[in-house]
Image (cartoon, grey):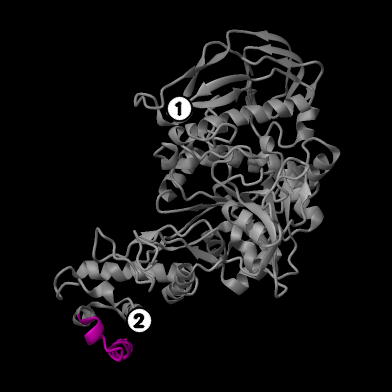
Amino acid sequence: MASALDSATEKLASLDIGGSAPNLQKNLHLLSTEQIQLAKIMLETGQSHLFEHWAEPGVDDEEKKAFFDQVSRLNSSYPGGLASYIKTARELLAESKAGKNPFDGFTPSVPTGESLNFGDDSFISFEESGVKEARRAAFVLVAGGLGERLGYNGIKVALPRETTTGTCFLQHYIESILALQDASSKLASGERQTRIPFVIMTSDDTHSRTLELLESNSYFGMEPSQVNLLKQEKVACLDDNDARLAVDPRNKYRIQTKPHGHGDVHSLLYSSGLLKVWHDAGLRWVLFFQDTNGLLFNAIPAALGVSATREYHVNSLTVPRKAKEAIGGITRLTHADGRSMVINVEYNQLDPLLRATGYPDGDVNNETGYSPFPGNINQLILELGSYIEELTKTGGAIKEFVNPKYKDASKTSFKSSTRLECMMQDYPKTLPPSARVGFTVMEPWLAYAPVKNNPEDAAKVPKGNPYHSATSGEMLVYRANSLILRKAGIQVADPEQQVINGQEVEVWPRITWKPKWAITFTDIKSKVSGSCSISQRSTLVIKGRNVFINSLSLDGALVIDPVDDAEVKVEGSVVNKGWVLEHVDYKDPSVPEELRTRGFRINKIEELEKK
């Protein structure tokens, strides 16, 4: 042990640290062999400034050791270690300063994909295929963010998807996966019951609270062994174009850190060993989704069916987008040297790229009224075998970018520290040309209701553009459910226009059901019959699996909550005072945050409950 330490010390001494880091030299005896190796990396990569403010030996010694504990975490959590991070940072910072266009030499075109219409024969066929495949899938939720941008101090997955039942996003996701698990297992007659794996990527901000939410609710009915939490680490901040690591302004013995982006999910899955476990168990698909899209699982079965039928290695779930709309477009990029890839191109890059490559009008709507480049909503389905093959080459590293905020046009200094970032949807950038990369377009009313803006920001959104708020997110759940039941033959009343939290929204009947009641359109059609009608002021809550609706006339509130999933037939006329939406002031601190963010509460005056 002593000889190893002596050897490491000699190597460090050979770096002439007396001149570059005299304070480190004085404190060398405090460090372990591993820490001396880390110090060597720091000096070799030009980070001697980190030791300029170190105290004499005997002062802050524990803080000095804690510094190297942090360096060790930063080094081990990044593919290739800190030396690789700093090298990549210098390259990307140099390109940023030079104004290099990452798309130089590429020509955009519309990639191949599948456009689906809810409820038609093709959609139903893809849904059926997707349910069959679900037992061979794993689900990955990217949930590293807090709800601060929404005006909510908790974790985003704890927010209610809708307040009629109070079901939070995480509960809805787990119950949807369990419903798919049951439906898929029933189709695989004779084979053992499958438990679909569920991974949640957390962060320092969300990890303990996510675990607490799961444990305090008995994992919402899922077996704890099905669930894995993978915590994302932050990355070092960069102070200048030389990629000098930033000292934390609150502690001279810490490096300032910031989130690296949700692209880390790939390296975490790779290093966890879960991908191999899944592959050995016969799984075929990995589905990635983000934390607050309450309509996502309406689209999952059909999109998975598209992946299986078309044999896509990568399938991006998308929605139609208007030209120049502030949402990235899935695009095929072909380079002059023959390389090509299908990736998300951000909206502010797509239009100039088209104009620069022979499309003088840029991003324009075609005869459908939409841009031919479908809108990326950051939900991916990857084929597991090719995914493992690719990550084995890259170690899970995703193409990064840097976005420094410069003080002036000289681009020589930053307003504040920056860092490298990566995005989950950039995974296809390193794939070979032979990779089958496609997309599935779903109607926005069915599949897309993200919740990401606070009431004040949402109220400033130009008229006609989506609000993406808690208010609109909940109303879009009711709209989707109303339109789905209309398609199944129920007469659902038209919505009423209201202004809530400064946002003009459609208020449809408050219709919601547990995923176990129906996970596909075929399920719904099999449970609805006769001449049914639901008034605009009505509330319908279906909590049971075996609930059948026949010739129901509803004008009020009806809650169907059978004991032990007993079969319940609902028919006839139901009229009562119902449940009423009451507006609340989002600035009123006496109102719970989760209600303030949406601008209303539900006053449950009268209802009929059927057991």
The residue drawn where x is 18% and y is 81% is 26
* Residue 54 visible (yes or no): yes
Residue type of the residue flagged with mark 2 = Gln
Query: Observer-nearest residue: 390 or 5?
Result: 390
* Contact (Cβ within 8 Å) of mark 2 with mark 1: no
Mark 2 or 1: in front is 1
The residue drawn where x is 59% and y is 54% is 346
Q: Which residue is tagged 1?
A: 595
Estimate the x, y position of residue 338 in percent, counting from the top left: 73, 73
- Image quarter where the C terminus lies is top right
Query: Observer-nearest residue: 487 or 187?
Result: 487
Q: Quadrant of residue 590?
A: top left
Please rate how many residues cluster around mark 2, counting C-alpha atoms within 10 Å: few if below 14, some from 14 to 19, many from 20: some
Q: Secondary structure at mark 1?
A: helix
By secondary structure, the bulk of the magenta-drawn segment is best described as helix
Estimate the x, y position of residue 525 in percent, counting from the top left: 79, 29
Q: Secondary structure at mark 2?
A: helix
> Any magenta on residue 395?
no
Which stretch is magenta?
Answer: 1-22
Report the Cα–Cα distance between label 2 and label 1: 52 Å
Q: Residue furthest right?
A: 121
The residue drawn where x is 69% and y is 36% is 446
Q: Residue furthest front?
A: 360
The residue drawn where x is 22% and y is 68% is 62
Estimate the x, y position of residue 495 in percent, counting from the top left: 65, 20
Q: Answer with left or right where residue 15 lies relative to residue 354.
A: left
Q: Answer with left or right where residue 348 lies relative to residue 335.
A: left
Q: Which residue is tagged 2?
A: 37
- Image quarter where the N terminus lies is bottom left
Residue type of the residue flagged with mark 1 = Leu
